[in-house]
Amino acid sequence: MRRPLVIGNWKMNGRSASVARLLNDILAGIGDCKAEVGVCVPFVYIPQASEILKGTKVMLGAQNVADHNSGAFTGEISAGMLREFGCEIVIVGHSERRLLYGESNELVASRYEQAIQGHLKPILCVGETLEQREHGRTLAVIGAQIDTVFEFAGVQSLEHAVIAYEPVWAVGTGHSATTGQAQEVHYHIRSLIGRWNPEVAQAVQIIYGGSVKPENAAELFAMPDIDGGLIGGASLDARAFLSICHSV
Ligand code: PEP
C-alpha cells in the first residue's frame, strides 16, 4: 500500500516571522493526519525551519538542488548541504525552473541524480504546457521527461523518489486538472514505469500538483493512482494546507 503524501511548495514567499508562524500553525493542527507531510521552504529559511520541525512528523525540504556535489558552481546548493540542515526531500524540475530558468530534461535529471546520491528524496516534477496538451503531446512530453531521469539514474532510483504530475496550465492558475485528466496521466506514468519494473511502479508515490485547494483535494486524492498532492499557493495558508492534508 502506498502512503499518501502531501508536500507544500512555498516558492519565494515568507519572512522569518511568517515562516515561524506558518510552521507552528501546521504543527498545531497536524494531529493524527494519515498522510506523510512535508514543506519545501526557501533555502535561507532552512536552518530556522529545521529547528522548528526537529523531532516532528513534518518533513523539511528544499525547492532545488545542485547538479554537482561541490565546487565552482556559484549560486548553487548541494544535496550534502541540504542534508546537513535536516532536509529529507527536494523538489526537482518544477515547471517554474524548467520554463522561467530554462532547465532542460538533462539538467533536471542531473539534479535528481545528485539528490539520490546525497540521500535526499527527489520530488520529480513532470508536466505538459497547454500548447503541448492541445497538440496531443501530453504523454510524449512526460515520457521524455521521465525517460531522461531513467537514463541518468536508473528506474530503480524511484524506490527513493516521488513523481509529481504538475500540468503547467494548472500550476498557480486556479484551474486544476479534472480528476479524470489527472488520473489518466498518473495511470500512464505508472504504466510507463511498469514496463521497466512492475514492483517499483506499484510502490512509487505519484502526487498531483496544480491548483489543489481544500475544495478539490479529497476528490483528486480518491483517484486510484493519485497518492497525494504538491501544493503551492494553498500551502501558504495553514488552515487551507491542513485541510488538504486531512483530506486523504
Ligand atoms: C506548485 O507550485 O507546485 C503548485 C502546484 O502551485 P499551485 O498549487 O499554486 O498551483
Image: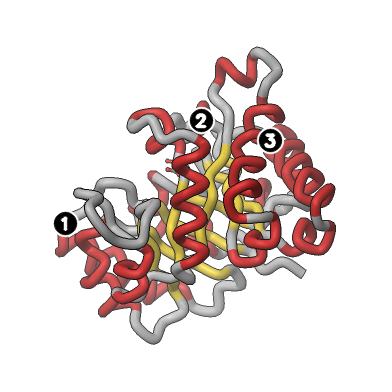
Res 168 label: 2
**Residue 104 x %, y %:** 46, 34
Q: Are marks 2 and 3 in contact (CB under 8 Å)?
A: no
User: Would residue 9 be found to the left or right of residue 84 on screen?
Assistant: right
**Label 1, label 3: how far apart the Cα atoms are:** 38 Å
**Label 2, label 1: how far apart the Cα atoms are:** 27 Å
| Depicted 130 relative to depicted 148: above or below | above
- Disc nearer the start of the sequence (1/3): 1
- Disc nearer the start of the sequence (2/1): 1
**Residue at the bottom extreme of this rendering:** 55
Q: Are marks 2 and 1 in contact (CB under 8 Å)?
A: no
**Label 2, label 3: how far apart the Cα atoms are:** 15 Å
Q: Label 3 sits on what residue type?
A: Gly
Task: Give the SS element for disc 3.
Answer: helix
Which residue appears at 57% of the width and 48% of the height? 164
| Depicted 23 relative to depicted 52: above or below | above
Q: Nearer the viewer, residue 69 or 158?
A: 69
**Residue 193 x %, y %:** 76, 49
Count residues near mark 1 (Cα–Cα under 10 Å), then give few for <14, some for 14-19, many for 20+.
Answer: few
> Can residue 238 be seen at all in this image of the molecule?
no
Quarter holding ligand 1: top left
Q: Label 1 sits on what residue type?
A: Arg
**Residue 79 x %, y %:** 37, 64
Pair 1/3: label in front? 3
Q: Which residue is mark 1?
A: 15
